[in-house]
Image (cartoon, grey):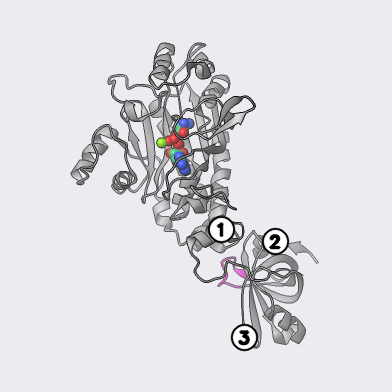
Amino acid sequence: MKKILINQMPNMIGEDVKLGAWIANKRSSGKIAFLQLRDGTGFVQGVVVKADVGEEIFQQAKSLTQESSVYVTGTVTADERNSFGCEIQVTSIELISEAVDFPITPKEHGTEFLMDNRHVWLRSRKQHAIMKIRNEIIRATYEFFNNEGFVKMDPPILTGSSPEGTSELFATKYFDEDAYLSQSGQLYMEAAAMAMGKVFSFGPTFRAEKSKTRRHLIEFWMIEPEMAFVEFDESLEVQENYVSYIVQAVLKNCKLELERLGRDVAKLENITAPFPRISYDDAIEFLHKQGFDDIQWGDDFGAPHETAIAEAYDKPVFITHYPIGIKPFYMQPHPERDDVVLCADLIAPEGYGEIIGGSERIYDYELMKQRIKEHNLDEEAYKWYLDLSKYGAVPHSGFGLGLERTVAWISGSEHVRESIPFPRLLNRLYP
Ligand code: 4AD
Ligand code: MG
C-alpha cells in the first residue's frame, strides 16, 4: 500500500493509504476511538470503529499511549471539521514503539518544566506551528533576496573584531590568539558588498547579554544585507519591502498555523510597505507628551518606550537618526548635524520591540580611523576593515533583522524562547 504524508491526504479522498505517525492524543468510547495523529507535516484524526475493525484492533487502538509511534492503514475520507478537510478511517494499526509516561501531557505545565523538556515539547501543536512559521520566514527571506539580485555570502563565526561593542562578547581561545563568537557579520558583509554589490548573510550570532527579557536570546539568527552604492533612505525601502514580503508569505503559506495559534491575521494583513518613519528627536518629544519623564535626549529607548511609540502605529515604524553617542562606531554622520547618525531601528507593532537595526556606513578613511580610536578599539584588528574605505570606498548601507523577534511577532508568541528550536538563554544551556 502507498505510504503517504498527512499533508498529502486532502488530495487522496477515497484512497486506501498507509501512514507513519505518532499518537498526539486519543479519546475513545465503547464503540469508537479517535486517534489524533501527527507526522510532522500535519495533524489528522484517525477514526477506529469497533464494528468495522473488530475487537482486537479496537482494543489495540484504545491502549495506545501518547507519543507511541505507529503505522496506520485506512481509507481517507472527507471531513469538514478537520483543518485539512479530511480524516482517516483506520483499518489496521502496527505499533512501532510504545512511549511510556511522555512528560508533556495535554494539561498545563510551568515554563521551566517545558524548557527542560524542549526536545519533546517541540512536538506539541503550538510549537509545531511556530516552527513552520519560522521555516516560512527563512524560505521567503532567501526568495526575496534572490529575486532582488543579492548574493548570499557567509561571514565567519569565529572572529577577531566586535562591531557592536566589546561588552557582550563570547571570548574563546583560537589556539594562541583571542577570538570571539560573531556578534554580527556586518563588517565582513561590507567587504563582501565591495566584491559582489548586494549581499546578504543568514547565520547565528552570539551576545553574552545579561538580559533576561522576552526579547533577548544569547544565540540568535540574523539576516544581514549589505548594499554598495545604496544610501540611507534607499536602504529603508529595501527593509520595508523585505518585512512586508515575509509577512505576506506567512499569511499565504501558513494559514493553518496562524489559525492554530489564534493569531489575529487582520493585524498582519495590514503590513504592507511603506512603513511610517519618526525621527529620534520627535520620538523623544512624543514620549514626553505621553508622560515618560524618565527619558532624556541622548538616552537609548527601553522596552516600554518602544512599545509606546509602536502603539501609535498599526505598522512597523522606523525610528531614525539616533544620537551618535548611543550607536556603534561605523555609522555615517548626518550631513548637516554632528549629533545624530544616518541610522534607523525598525520597531514591530504590538510590543514586540526592535526587529531591525541598520544604517548607512562611514566610507571616509580618516573619519573611520578617528571613530575606531574614539571607541577604544584595537586598530590592528580593524586594519582590514579600514582597507575598505581606502580602496574605492563608496556610500553603502545595510541592516540586520533578528529572526527570532520577527518569528515571535508574526506568530504572536509571548517570548522569543519559543521562536527558536533550542533557545540559549541566560542560565539555560540544556537541552
Ligand atoms: O541592532 P543590532 O545589534 O544590529 C547589528 O548587529 C548590526 N551590526 C546589524 C547590521 O547592520 N548588519 O542587531 C540587529 C537585530 C536587532 O534589531 C534584533 O532584532 C536582533 O538583531 N537582536 C537580538 N535578537 C534576540 N536576542 C538578542 N539578544 C538580540 N540582539 C539583537
Ligand atoms: Mg539594535
Which amino acid, by three-letter code, is at mark 3? Ser
Mark identifier at residue 116: 1
Q: Which of marks 3 and 1 is nearer the N terminus?
A: 3
Residue 217 appears left or right of 321: right
Residue 4 in sight here? yes
Q: Do the residues labelled 2 and 3 touch (CB within 8 Å)?
A: no
Residue 156 in sight here? no
* Inter-mark Cα distance, 1 to 2: 30 Å
* Inter-mark Cα distance, 2 to 3: 27 Å
Give the residue pinned by disc 2: 5
Q: Do the residues labelled 3 and 1 touch (CB within 8 Å)?
A: no
The picture quadrant where one finds residue 116 is: bottom right
Residue 50 appears left or right of 161: right
Image vertical order of residue 315 relative to residue 116, above or below: above
Image vertical order of residue 69 relative to residue 143, above or below: below
Q: Disc 2 or disc 3, which is closer to the eye? A: 3
Image vertical order of residue 191 relative to residue 10, above or below: above
Q: Which of marks 2 and 3 is nearer the N terminus?
A: 2
Q: In this picture, which residue range is highlighted in magenta?
A: 79-86
Q: Do the residues labelled 1 and 2 touch (CB within 8 Å)?
A: no
- Image spot of residue 56 (x, y percent): 77, 84
Which amino acid, by three-letter code, is at mark 2? Leu
- Asked which secondary structure carries label 1, the reply is helix
Q: Residues within 10 Å of mark 2 (few under 14, many from 20)?
A: some
Judged from the image, the quadrant occupied by ligand 2 is top left
